[in-house]
Amino acid sequence: MSPTMAEKEQAEVVNEQLRIAIREIVREVNQEQIRARELDLIERVVSVEKSLENLNLRMIERFDQIQKQFLQVDRRFEDMLRLMDVRFEQVEKRFEQVDKRFEQVDKRFSQMQWTIGLGFTLMTVVMTLYRFLG
């Protein structure tokens, strides 16, 4: 039995309808896969954004810690400078005291020079008088 023309046309119509249905099913499956991929990508983007936000917060915290450490170092440096200023003032005072002592020693030395000079002069005068008178 050979198929009749009507059966052939019916078979072609059914084949065409099946092709259309299969295309629709494939499109729907592809769209679902695309949607699934899009959702996966969206989840990944959200995850990356959260990671970046956490990283940004940690960086801000770290920069704040570093800023605090710099402030502490700056305070220590200022304290050291103040301490050095105080010590330099103390050293200057000691040098001034030493200068005064040298001035006193210089005065005493000058007095001793004059005294020794006067002593030699008096001895010379006394010896000269003793020679002429004696």
Image: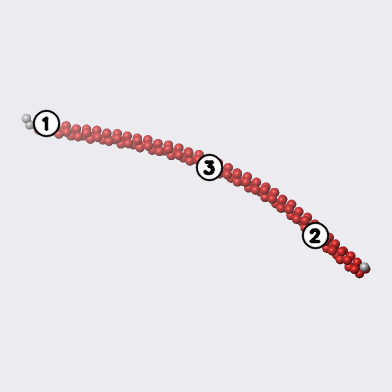
Query: For this rendering, which residue is in front, 35 or 116?
Result: 116
* Distance in Å between CA atoms under marks 1 and 3: 86 Å
Type of the residue with mark 3: Ile
Element type at marker 2? helix
Above or below, 31 against 117 in this view is above
The structure residue drawn at horizontal position 35% and vertical position 35%, both measured from the top left corner, is 39
Farthest left residue? 1
Element type at marker 1? helix
Q: Quadrant of residue 20?
A: top left
Tell me, for residue 7, which label it has, or none. 1
The crowd level at tag 3 (other Cα within 10 Å; few <14, some 14-19, many 20+) is few
Q: Position of residue 117 (x, y in %)?
A: 83, 63
Which quadrant would the N terminus be assigned to in this image?
A: top left
Query: For this rendering, which residue is in front, 119 or 44?
Result: 119
Q: Quadrant of residue 53?
A: top left
The residue indicated by pointer 3 is: 66
Viewer-nearest of discs 3 and 2: 2
The crowd level at tag 2 (other Cα within 10 Å; few <14, some 14-19, many 20+) is few
Mark closer to the chain start, 1 or 3 = 1
* Distance in Å between CA atoms under marks 3 and 2: 64 Å
The residue indicated by pointer 2 is: 110
Residue 128 falls left or right of residue 67 = right
Above or below, 12 against 102 in this view is above
Residue 26 falls left or right of residue 125 = left
Mark closer to the chain start, 1 or 2 = 1
